[in-house]
Image: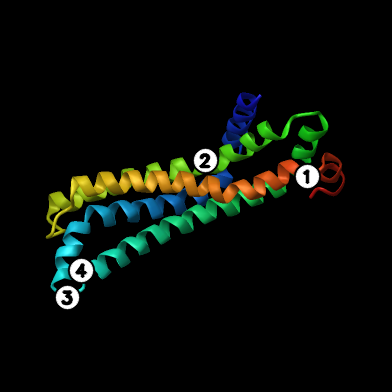
Amino acid sequence: MTKFGLSYGWLAARRRVREMVLPIVTTATGAFLVVIVFGMSAGIQAQSASLGHADEIGRAVILIAITVLLVGVVEVAVATTRTIAHRTRELGVLGATGVPRRPVIAALLVEPAVAAILGAVAGVVLAVVAAVVLGALGLVPTGVSAAGVGFGAAIAIAVSILAALATSIVPTWNAASRPPIRSLSTGG
């Protein structure tokens, strides 16, 4: 039954792709920054060593990059809440026709997962292209580490997906748990 919920969620996400643009762009921006920061982390640490606080500066730069990524993920959660608010009657119909809670939750979680994946992958691709171009043009004197870019890409994608699902589960659970008559009669 969950498989049908995922299929329904995929169709709904495809239909609502315009509403997902802002969360995708915000997540892509955060992912881009995370990948670039991790790719340049060796150079940042080398430069900050001359200031005498290499470890603190390195941790601060990574913390800022991950914070920006999490801001993008929060935008995904806000978009999920907005989506659920617009779909209350639809959720009421699903509940009234006997669709169990699990497929409804699966359907509602598809959209934030898709937005997080698309945003993270787009940000990673742009960051890799930027790193290659910056390195080829010699605009980054300390260089861009391929290992750092790879590690940053893995972190950006994993954190985006996990955080988007974690922040979207509560509004999704609440919406799927609402009595159908309430969703149908009051719209929320």
| Residue at the limit of the structure toward the front, as seen here | 55
Query: Do the CB atoms of the residues marked 3 and 4 lie less than 8 Å apart?
Result: yes
Name the element at disc 3: loop
Mark 2 is surrounded, within 10 Å at the Cα level, by few (under 14), some (14 to 19) or many (20 or more) other residues, namely many
Of the two numbered discs 2 and 1 on the same chain, state the one appearing first in sequence.
2
Q: Which residue is mark 3?
A: 51
> In the image, which is nearer the foreground, mark 2 or mark 1?
1
The answer to which of 23 and 96 lies nearer the viewer is 96
The answer to which of 129 and 188 lies nearer the viewer is 188
Q: Residue 178: where, in percent of width, then height?
A: 78, 44
Q: Which residue is mark 1?
A: 178
Of the two numbered discs 1 and 4 on the same chain, state the one appearing first in sequence.
4
Q: Which residue is mark 4?
A: 54
Q: Is 27 positioned to the left or the right of 97 in the image? A: left
Q: CA distance from mark 2 to mark 1?
A: 22 Å
Q: Which residue is mark 2?
A: 113
Amino acid marked by disc 3 = Leu
Name the element at disc 2: helix
Name the element at disc 4: helix
Image quadrant in which you'd find residue 66: bottom left
Q: Is 15 positioned to the left or the right of 87 in the image? A: left
Amino acid marked by disc 4 = Ala
> In the image, which is nearer the foreground, mark 2 or mark 3?
3
Q: CA distance from mark 1 to mark 4?
A: 52 Å
Q: Residue at x 33, y 43 (%)?
A: 154
Q: Residue at x 18, y 50 (%)?
A: 145
Q: Is 149 positioned to the left or the right of 171 in the image? A: left
Amino acid marked by disc 1 = Arg
Mark 1 is surrounded, within 10 Å at the Cα level, by few (under 14), some (14 to 19) or many (20 or more) other residues, namely some
Mark 4 is surrounded, within 10 Å at the Cα level, by few (under 14), some (14 to 19) or many (20 or more) other residues, namely some
Q: Residue 14: where, in percent of width, then height?
A: 57, 34
> In the image, which is nearer the foreground, mark 2 or mark 4?
4
